[in-house]
Amino acid sequence: MPTKTSTGRGARGARGARPPLRTARAAPPDMAVEAIALDRRLAAIGGLEERLLEITRSVPGRVTFSTSLGIEDQAVLNAIATSGAAIDVFTLDTGRHFPETLETLEASENRYGLKIRVMFPDAREVEELVARDGIYGFRLAVENRKACCEVRKVRPLKRALAGAAGWVTGLRREQSAGRAHVPFAAWDSENALVKLNPIADWSLEQLEAYVAANNVPVNPLHARGFPSIGCQPCTRAIKPGEDIRAGRWWWENEDGKECGLHNRPRQKDAAA
Ligand code: SF4
Protein backbone atom coordinates (compact mmCIF):
# COMPACT_ATOMS: atom_id res chain seq x y z
CA MET A 1 0.00 0.00 0.00
CA PRO A 2 1.50 3.30 -0.99
CA THR A 3 2.25 5.69 1.84
CA LYS A 4 3.09 9.34 2.18
CA THR A 5 5.72 8.61 4.80
CA SER A 6 9.33 9.07 3.81
CA THR A 7 11.50 5.97 4.00
CA GLY A 8 14.65 7.99 4.32
CA ARG A 9 15.71 6.85 0.88
CA GLY A 10 14.78 10.15 -0.72
CA ALA A 11 16.54 12.08 -3.45
CA ARG A 12 18.84 14.08 -1.21
CA GLY A 13 22.13 12.56 -0.36
CA ALA A 14 21.71 9.66 -2.75
CA ARG A 15 24.84 8.38 -4.36
CA GLY A 16 25.00 9.58 -7.90
CA ALA A 17 22.29 12.23 -7.41
CA ARG A 18 22.89 15.33 -9.45
CA PRO A 19 22.33 18.87 -8.24
CA PRO A 20 19.05 20.58 -9.20
CA LEU A 21 19.07 21.99 -12.69
CA ARG A 22 16.81 24.92 -12.02
CA THR A 23 18.52 28.25 -11.97
CA ALA A 24 16.32 31.29 -12.21
CA ARG A 25 17.65 33.78 -14.71
CA ALA A 26 16.59 37.35 -15.25
CA ALA A 27 14.59 38.04 -18.39
CA PRO A 28 16.17 40.16 -21.07
CA PRO A 29 14.27 43.41 -20.39
CA ASP A 30 12.66 43.50 -23.83
CA MET A 31 11.34 39.90 -23.65
CA ALA A 32 9.85 40.36 -20.19
CA VAL A 33 7.94 43.36 -21.48
CA GLU A 34 7.07 41.64 -24.75
CA ALA A 35 5.66 38.63 -22.88
CA ILE A 36 3.22 40.88 -21.04
CA ALA A 37 2.16 42.58 -24.27
CA LEU A 38 1.84 39.22 -26.03
CA ASP A 39 -0.31 37.90 -23.19
CA ARG A 40 -2.76 40.73 -23.81
CA ARG A 41 -2.77 40.26 -27.57
CA LEU A 42 -3.44 36.53 -27.24
CA ALA A 43 -6.33 37.20 -24.88
CA ALA A 44 -7.93 39.33 -27.58
CA ILE A 45 -7.59 36.64 -30.29
CA GLY A 46 -10.37 34.05 -30.43
CA GLY A 47 -9.05 31.24 -32.62
CA LEU A 48 -6.36 28.78 -31.55
CA GLU A 49 -4.70 28.73 -34.97
CA GLU A 50 -4.52 32.54 -34.99
CA ARG A 51 -3.06 32.53 -31.49
CA LEU A 52 -0.29 30.16 -32.59
CA LEU A 53 0.52 32.30 -35.61
CA GLU A 54 0.69 35.39 -33.38
CA ILE A 55 3.08 33.50 -31.10
CA THR A 56 5.46 32.65 -33.95
CA ARG A 57 5.33 36.25 -35.19
CA SER A 58 6.08 37.62 -31.74
CA VAL A 59 8.69 35.29 -30.27
CA PRO A 60 12.10 35.72 -31.91
CA GLY A 61 13.78 32.33 -32.22
CA ARG A 62 12.76 28.68 -32.01
CA VAL A 63 9.33 27.93 -30.59
CA THR A 64 8.74 24.40 -29.37
CA PHE A 65 5.68 22.52 -28.14
CA SER A 66 5.80 19.82 -25.46
CA THR A 67 3.01 17.29 -25.84
CA SER A 68 1.93 14.63 -23.37
CA LEU A 69 -0.46 13.27 -26.02
CA GLY A 70 -3.42 14.18 -23.78
CA ILE A 71 -6.57 15.75 -25.21
CA GLU A 72 -5.43 19.34 -24.62
CA ASP A 73 -2.13 18.75 -26.37
CA GLN A 74 -3.83 16.92 -29.22
CA ALA A 75 -5.95 20.02 -29.87
CA VAL A 76 -2.84 22.20 -29.91
CA LEU A 77 -1.08 19.71 -32.20
CA ASN A 78 -4.01 19.81 -34.62
CA ALA A 79 -3.84 23.61 -34.69
CA ILE A 80 -0.08 23.61 -35.28
CA ALA A 81 -0.52 21.22 -38.21
CA THR A 82 -3.45 23.02 -39.79
CA SER A 83 -2.12 26.56 -39.28
CA GLY A 84 1.38 25.78 -40.55
CA ALA A 85 2.83 27.67 -37.56
CA ALA A 86 6.60 27.11 -37.35
CA ILE A 87 6.57 25.23 -34.05
CA ASP A 88 8.47 22.00 -33.51
CA VAL A 89 6.97 19.25 -31.38
CA PHE A 90 8.46 16.94 -28.79
CA THR A 91 7.26 14.51 -26.14
CA LEU A 92 8.86 12.87 -23.11
CA ASP A 93 8.95 9.08 -23.08
CA THR A 94 9.42 8.24 -19.41
CA GLY A 95 9.54 4.49 -20.06
CA ARG A 96 6.39 4.09 -17.93
CA HIS A 97 3.67 5.20 -20.37
CA PHE A 98 0.44 3.36 -21.13
CA PRO A 99 0.58 1.55 -24.50
CA GLU A 100 -2.41 3.69 -25.53
CA THR A 101 -0.30 6.83 -25.16
CA LEU A 102 2.38 5.53 -27.51
CA GLU A 103 -0.31 4.44 -29.96
CA THR A 104 -1.69 7.99 -29.86
CA LEU A 105 1.79 9.27 -30.70
CA GLU A 106 2.01 7.05 -33.76
CA ALA A 107 -1.56 7.85 -34.85
CA SER A 108 -0.82 11.57 -34.59
CA GLU A 109 2.32 11.34 -36.70
CA ASN A 110 0.38 9.45 -39.35
CA ARG A 111 -2.58 11.80 -39.25
CA TYR A 112 -0.59 15.02 -39.52
CA GLY A 113 2.42 13.78 -41.49
CA LEU A 114 4.89 15.20 -38.99
CA LYS A 115 7.53 13.85 -36.65
CA ILE A 116 7.25 14.21 -32.90
CA ARG A 117 10.70 14.29 -31.34
CA VAL A 118 10.83 11.74 -28.51
CA MET A 119 13.05 12.63 -25.55
CA PHE A 120 14.23 9.79 -23.31
CA PRO A 121 15.74 9.92 -19.82
CA ASP A 122 19.41 9.25 -19.30
CA ALA A 123 19.79 5.45 -19.01
CA ARG A 124 22.46 5.62 -16.30
CA GLU A 125 20.36 7.96 -14.17
CA VAL A 126 17.35 5.63 -14.43
CA GLU A 127 19.50 2.64 -13.48
CA GLU A 128 20.84 4.45 -10.41
CA LEU A 129 17.37 5.59 -9.40
CA VAL A 130 15.88 2.09 -9.63
CA ALA A 131 18.88 0.55 -7.87
CA ARG A 132 18.43 3.00 -4.99
CA ASP A 133 14.61 3.22 -4.66
CA GLY A 134 13.27 0.08 -6.35
CA ILE A 135 11.16 -0.32 -9.45
CA TYR A 136 8.08 1.16 -7.69
CA GLY A 137 10.04 3.25 -5.20
CA PHE A 138 8.20 6.41 -6.22
CA ARG A 139 5.19 5.22 -4.22
CA LEU A 140 7.12 4.99 -0.96
CA ALA A 141 7.82 8.68 -0.42
CA VAL A 142 7.06 12.01 -2.03
CA GLU A 143 10.79 12.64 -2.25
CA ASN A 144 11.25 9.42 -4.22
CA ARG A 145 8.40 10.35 -6.55
CA LYS A 146 9.89 13.75 -7.19
CA ALA A 147 13.28 12.16 -7.86
CA CYS A 148 11.69 9.82 -10.40
CA CYS A 149 9.89 12.71 -12.14
CA GLU A 150 13.12 14.69 -12.11
CA VAL A 151 15.09 11.94 -13.87
CA ARG A 152 12.38 10.71 -16.23
CA LYS A 153 10.68 14.04 -17.05
CA VAL A 154 12.31 17.24 -15.87
CA ARG A 155 15.86 16.63 -17.08
CA PRO A 156 14.77 15.43 -20.55
CA LEU A 157 12.47 18.48 -20.69
CA LYS A 158 15.40 20.78 -19.97
CA ARG A 159 17.37 19.20 -22.79
CA ALA A 160 14.45 19.64 -25.18
CA LEU A 161 13.98 23.30 -24.20
CA ALA A 162 17.66 24.22 -24.42
CA GLY A 163 18.10 27.05 -26.89
CA ALA A 164 14.37 27.58 -27.45
CA ALA A 165 12.92 31.09 -27.25
CA GLY A 166 9.32 29.97 -26.70
CA TRP A 167 7.66 26.94 -25.06
CA VAL A 168 4.06 26.14 -25.98
CA THR A 169 1.96 24.00 -23.64
CA GLY A 170 -1.65 22.78 -23.44
CA LEU A 171 -2.25 23.98 -19.87
CA ARG A 172 -5.78 25.10 -19.02
CA ARG A 173 -6.86 27.12 -16.00
CA GLU A 174 -9.74 24.75 -15.30
CA GLN A 175 -7.47 21.74 -14.82
CA SER A 176 -6.63 22.38 -11.18
CA ALA A 177 -6.54 25.06 -8.51
CA GLY A 178 -2.80 25.36 -9.05
CA ARG A 179 -3.35 26.24 -12.70
CA ALA A 180 -6.20 28.70 -12.13
CA HIS A 181 -4.07 31.73 -13.00
CA VAL A 182 -2.08 30.36 -15.94
CA PRO A 183 -1.41 33.28 -18.32
CA PHE A 184 -1.35 33.08 -22.11
CA ALA A 185 2.26 34.25 -22.13
CA ALA A 186 4.81 34.94 -19.42
CA TRP A 187 8.56 35.10 -19.04
CA ASP A 188 9.79 31.80 -17.58
CA SER A 189 12.93 32.65 -15.65
CA GLU A 190 13.72 29.01 -14.83
CA ASN A 191 14.02 28.11 -18.49
CA ALA A 192 14.94 31.55 -19.82
CA LEU A 193 12.19 31.63 -22.44
CA VAL A 194 8.62 32.77 -22.97
CA LYS A 195 6.14 30.14 -21.81
CA LEU A 196 2.97 30.11 -23.87
CA ASN A 197 -0.38 28.58 -22.98
CA PRO A 198 -2.69 29.25 -25.95
CA ILE A 199 -5.69 27.32 -24.57
CA ALA A 200 -5.35 28.63 -21.00
CA ASP A 201 -8.90 30.00 -21.06
CA TRP A 202 -10.60 27.01 -22.71
CA SER A 203 -13.32 25.12 -20.87
CA LEU A 204 -13.57 21.35 -21.13
CA GLU A 205 -16.70 21.76 -23.24
CA GLN A 206 -14.86 24.07 -25.64
CA LEU A 207 -11.97 21.64 -25.87
CA GLU A 208 -14.18 18.64 -26.56
CA ALA A 209 -16.15 20.59 -29.18
CA TYR A 210 -12.90 21.54 -30.98
CA VAL A 211 -11.67 17.95 -30.92
CA ALA A 212 -14.96 16.61 -32.24
CA ALA A 213 -15.28 19.26 -34.96
CA ASN A 214 -11.76 18.58 -36.21
CA ASN A 215 -11.81 14.80 -35.75
CA VAL A 216 -8.64 15.04 -33.67
CA PRO A 217 -7.15 11.66 -32.64
CA VAL A 218 -7.27 11.26 -28.87
CA ASN A 219 -5.94 8.78 -26.35
CA PRO A 220 -8.68 6.11 -25.90
CA LEU A 221 -8.05 6.19 -22.14
CA HIS A 222 -9.94 9.49 -21.93
CA ALA A 223 -13.16 7.58 -22.69
CA ARG A 224 -12.36 5.12 -19.87
CA GLY A 225 -12.30 7.63 -17.03
CA PHE A 226 -8.80 9.10 -17.44
CA PRO A 227 -9.16 12.88 -18.04
CA SER A 228 -5.48 13.40 -17.16
CA ILE A 229 -3.01 10.76 -18.32
CA GLY A 230 0.52 10.41 -17.03
CA CYS A 231 2.72 7.39 -16.39
CA GLN A 232 0.80 4.12 -16.04
CA PRO A 233 1.79 3.32 -12.42
CA CYS A 234 0.99 6.88 -11.30
CA THR A 235 -2.39 7.37 -12.99
CA ARG A 236 -5.79 5.86 -12.23
CA ALA A 237 -9.28 6.46 -13.58
CA ILE A 238 -11.35 8.96 -11.60
CA LYS A 239 -14.83 8.57 -10.16
CA PRO A 240 -17.76 10.83 -11.10
CA GLY A 241 -17.42 14.18 -9.34
CA GLU A 242 -13.70 13.88 -8.62
CA ASP A 243 -11.23 16.58 -9.65
CA ILE A 244 -9.87 15.92 -13.13
CA ARG A 245 -6.34 15.50 -11.76
CA ALA A 246 -7.44 13.33 -8.82
CA GLY A 247 -6.14 10.24 -10.62
CA ARG A 248 -2.56 11.52 -10.69
CA TRP A 249 -0.36 10.40 -7.74
CA TRP A 250 -3.60 9.70 -5.89
CA TRP A 251 -1.80 8.52 -2.77
CA GLU A 252 -0.34 12.00 -2.15
CA ASN A 253 -1.88 15.16 -0.70
CA GLU A 254 -3.83 17.30 -3.14
CA ASP A 255 -1.54 20.32 -2.66
CA GLY A 256 1.16 20.76 -5.25
CA LYS A 257 0.61 17.57 -7.23
CA GLU A 258 2.82 18.57 -10.13
CA CYS A 259 5.71 16.63 -11.59
CA GLY A 260 8.02 19.63 -11.91
CA LEU A 261 7.34 20.28 -15.59
CA HIS A 262 4.86 23.06 -14.90
CA ASN A 263 5.58 24.85 -11.67
CA ARG A 264 3.35 27.72 -10.75
CA PRO A 265 4.51 30.98 -12.31
CA ARG A 266 5.99 33.38 -9.81
CA GLN A 267 3.98 36.55 -9.46
CA LYS A 268 6.66 38.73 -10.95
CA ASP A 269 7.00 36.42 -13.99
CA ALA A 270 3.32 36.22 -14.74
CA ALA A 271 1.72 38.67 -17.07
CA ALA A 272 -1.03 40.78 -15.58
S1 SF4 B 1 4.79 10.04 -13.02
FE1 SF4 B 1 5.46 8.28 -11.73
S2 SF4 B 1 6.63 6.85 -13.06
FE2 SF4 B 1 6.33 8.82 -14.17
S3 SF4 B 1 8.22 9.91 -13.81
FE3 SF4 B 1 6.80 10.61 -12.21
S4 SF4 B 1 7.04 9.19 -10.45
FE4 SF4 B 1 8.11 8.29 -12.23
Image (cartoon, rainbow, N blue to C red):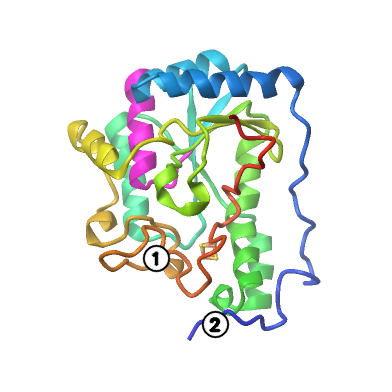
Q: Which residue is mark 2?
A: 3
Highlighted magenta segment, given as a residue range: 66-84
- Tell whether 50 sits left or right of 59: left
Q: Which residue is mark 1?
A: 247
- Nearer the observer, 154 or 172: 172
* Relative vertical location of residue 165 with respect to residue 175 in this rendering, above or below: above
- Tell whether 21 sits left or right of 225: right
* Relative vertical location of residue 126 with respect to residue 42 in this rendering, above or below: below
Q: Give coordinates of residue 137: x percent, y percent.
A: 58, 77
Q: Residue at x 32, y 22 (%)?
A: 82
- Which secondary structure lies at badge 1? loop
**Residue sticking out furthest to the top:** 57
Q: Characterize the local packing of mark 1: few (<14), some (14-19) or many (20 or more) Cα atoms within 10 angstroms.
A: many
Q: Residue at x 46, y 42 (%)?
A: 171
Q: Characterize the local packing of mark 2: few (<14), some (14-19) or many (20 or more) Cα atoms within 10 angstroms.
A: few
- Which secondary structure lies at badge 2? loop
User: Which quadrant is home to the C terminus?
Assistant: top right
Residue 144 occupies quadrant: bottom right
Q: Give coordinates of residue 135: x percent, y percent.
A: 55, 76
* Relative vertical location of residue 143 with respect to residue 82 in this rendering, above or below: below
Instruction: Return the disc, 1 or 2, that comes first in the chain's sequence.
Output: 2
Indicate whether residue 209 is drawn in magenta.
no
